[in-house]
Structures are given as C-alpha cells and as structure tokens.
Amino acid sequence: NAGVTQTPKFQVLKTGQSMTLQCAQDMNHEYMSWYRQDPGMGLRLIHYSVGAGITDQGEVPNGYNVSRSTTEDFPLRLLSAAPSRTSVYFCASSYRQVNEKLFFGSGTQLSVL
Amino acid sequence: AQSVTQLDSQVPVFEEAPVELRCNYSSSVSVYLFWYVQYPNQGLQLLLKYLSGSTLVESINGFEAEFNKSQTSFHLRKPSVHISDTAEYFCAVLNTGGFKTIFGAGTRLFVKA
C-alpha cells in the first residue's frame, strides 16, 4: 500500500516559470489537501478538496491552482513562480470529508531562484 | 476562524527527563485537536487526537495530551523522553463540521544524552 505519493521530491525553478506538483493516494480517500511548510510558520493550508470535482481555498491560495478530476489525484499548479514560493509542499489525505486523521506524503522541496 | 499557538519554538531536554509542549487554540465553535510529529526529512504522522469523550488522550509511545476547554489548551506531555523522540511536533485544530485543519508553528524537541 503506497499511501500518499508526491512527485517530484525536489525541484528548482526560475522566477516566472510554472509547474505542477503531483499527488496521488491509493486509499480511496475523499479528502485531499495541499500545505506549504516554512520555518517558524508551521504548515499553512493552500487548497483542499472534499471529493472529485470539488475544490476550495485554504489560508494561502494565491498563486496556486488545483483540480480534482479523480478521487486518486490532486495536482497543485504553481503559476508564475516567485522566490516567495520557495517552500516544502506536502499533500495530505483523509478517509472522510471531516478529516479526523491526515495521511501525509513525504513532501516536495521547491526552490525558486 | 480557528488558530493555534505553540508557545515554544524549541525545547531542549535531557534523556529520561519529563517534557511538556504547550499548545493553545482559538475557535468560536467546538473543535477537534491533534498532535502530529515530523521526523527529519519526512512527512507528518498523527501522534494523538482528541475528538470527544475523555479529555485525556494517549499515544502508543508514551505521550499524552489533555484537552482543557476553559483554558483552550491541549498540552502534550511525556514523563520520560528518549533520544528517539527528537523531532518537530505540531499542534493542530479542526472545527467540528469543518474541512480546514490548521496547524501551529511547531515545537522542535531536542533530547540530549
């Protein structure tokens, strides 16, 4: 059972470039979410989804888009990268819409130059 | 909106000593409370949670936390720590019926021999 899989593990972008961070889970979880982790700030919620076709904004959604076309996948698209987007990004999922326990991926470390 | 404050950014402690990691939350509605642990270069893992019922909850590795509604706190304790407990610990809150788990800034526990 793979759990929550994130790719890539590391990425370096130049300012202005865009890219998509991939997240997939094989646990048939309804709920999926994206967080960014920055030193001294903990994890901040970017976007979340309570099921296929349904997404909503978290605490820091600006500059990011998401889509949920299937239950398994929840990609995060960075629009026009800036140095402020340098962070570690985590995808998390849970079985029910009320996310009593989140299962986290291993993270994507993104650097924007 | 809910929020979480972790009062200590770093806690150094000697092996076999007791430790308390402090967490206070703010919310206008009833909440679920969580502690997650992050070991180096890994994603977060659930350590323990309070959903309802007994206000004292325990983990399988000796940690416990007590929900105190009047003080809006959910402090994490362990009577005797091990070197292997060295990690970053995150307190998190979720409004009942909500979809956004909000994390604190984290407390880095460093256990010294």
Image (cartoon, helix red, strand yellow):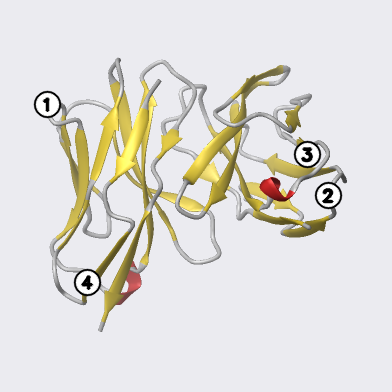
Instruction: Give the residue number, with chain letter if any, for mark 3.
Output: A78
Q: Amino acid at mark 4?
A: Val
Instruction: Give the residue number, with chain letter if any, for mark 1.
Output: B70
Label 1 resides on the chain identified as: B
Q: CA distance from mark 3 to mark 2?
A: 11 Å
Residue B98, placed above or below residue A103: above
Would you say the residues marked 2 and 4 are in contact, meaning their CB atoms lie under 8 Å apart? Answer: no
Q: CA distance from mark 1 to mark 2?
A: 48 Å
Where in the figure is residue A38, as x and y percent of width and height?
A: 54, 51
Label 2 resides on the chain identified as: A
Instruction: Left or right? Give the position of A77 relative to B105.
Output: right
Count neighbours of disc 2 (C-alpha within 10 A) and say few if under 14, some if 14 to 19, many if 20 or more: some
Q: CA distance from mark 3 to mark 4?
A: 40 Å
Which corner quadrant of the image does residue B87 belong to?
A: bottom left
Pick whichever of labels 4 and 1 is earlier in the sequence. Answer: 4
Q: Amino acid at mark 2?
A: Thr
Where in the figure is residue A5, as x and y percent of width and height?
A: 68, 49
Q: Residue at x 48, y 51 (%)?
A: B44
Instruction: Give the residue number, with chain letter if any, for mark 4.
Output: B13
Q: Amino acid at mark 1?
A: Ser
| Label 4 in the same subunit as label 1 | yes
Label 4 resides on the chain identified as: B
Q: CA distance from mark 4 to mark 1?
A: 29 Å
Instruction: Give the residue number, with chain letter if any, for mark 2.
Output: A15
Count neighbours of disc 4 (C-alpha within 10 A) and say few if under 14, some if 14 to 19, many if 20 or more: some
Q: CA distance from mark 2 to mark 4?
A: 42 Å
Q: Is residue A29 visible?
A: no
Looking at the rendered structure, the secondary structure element under dot 2 is loop
Instruction: Left or right? Give the position of B64 relative to B90.
Output: left
